[in-house]
Image (cartoon, rainbow, N blue to C red):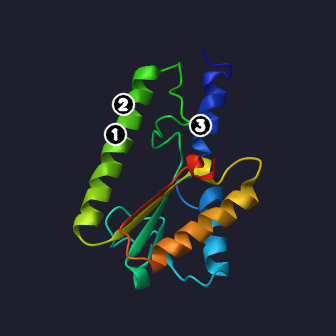
Amino acid sequence: MDIVIPEKRSLLMSGIRSKNTKPEILIRKELFKSGFRYRLNVKNVFGKPDIVLKKFNAVIFIHGCFWHGHEGCKNFKIPSSNREFWVAKIDRNRKRDAEVLNYLHATGWRICIIWECAIRGKKQLQKTDKTISKISKWLRSKRIWLEITSDAYK
């Protein structure tokens, strides 16, 4: 049972942005400080990745654990009210994510996914430093794929 009345829940959910979220801004600032230059939400790159580093032929997605259905994450739980809607919504998001990643991979892009849980919490700055270090090493390597979750820091 939801502890918030439907009108309040609707107001809360409508305030959630799809671009320029706190995790995105945090990663962008740190990447810039580290000397990386990028473009944001490039329309002519399929799926409009959050960050595009053309020089490295790489894209970075910063996924919210709830909205992208991060399995096994403490930040992902299907709400008990209107459960059918949320299950369908998260499933659509996952399918779209898979299509985007498959297409980008097939067209030669290198892909990094940073889950919100990896850069959120008590030790946020320490986690962000480690995340930027991992991204920096990945960009300079030839590896095609990088996924960063909170498990990376245990």
Quadrant of the snapshot with the N terminus = top right
Q: Nearer the viewer, mark 1 or mark 3?
A: 3
Instruction: Count every numbered label the image shows and give the total.
Output: 3
Inspect this view and state whether residue 40 appears. Answer: no
Inspect this view and state whether residue 38 appears. Answer: yes
- Picture residue at 60% right of the left edge, 47% below the top: 117
For this orientation, the residue located farthest to the right is 122
For this orientation, the residue located farthest to the front is 154
Callout 3, which amino acid? Asn
- Picture residue at 37% right of the left edge, 78% below the top: 57
- Picture residue at 50% right of the left edge, 34% below the top: 72
Crowding near pointer 1: few (<14 within 10 Å), some, many (20+)?
few
Callout 1, which amino acid? Arg
Say the numbered circle drawn on residue 75: 3
Check the image and report above or below for 143 versus 70: below
Which quarter of the figure has residue 32?
bottom right
Which quarter of the figure has residue 10?
top right
To which residue does mark 2 refer? 88
In contact (CB < 8 Å): disc 1 and disc 2: yes
To which residue does mark 1 refer? 92
Callout 2, which amino acid? Ala
For the residues labelled 1 and 3, the Cα–Cα distance comes to 19 Å
Crowding near pointer 2: few (<14 within 10 Å), some, many (20+)?
few
Residue 146 x/y as whole percent: 44, 61
Q: Secondary structure at mark 2?
A: helix
For the residues labelled 3 and 2, the Cα–Cα distance comes to 18 Å
Q: State left or right for residue 124 relative to residue 80.
A: right
Residue 122 x/y as whole percent: 77, 47
Check the image and report above or below for 12 versus 104: above
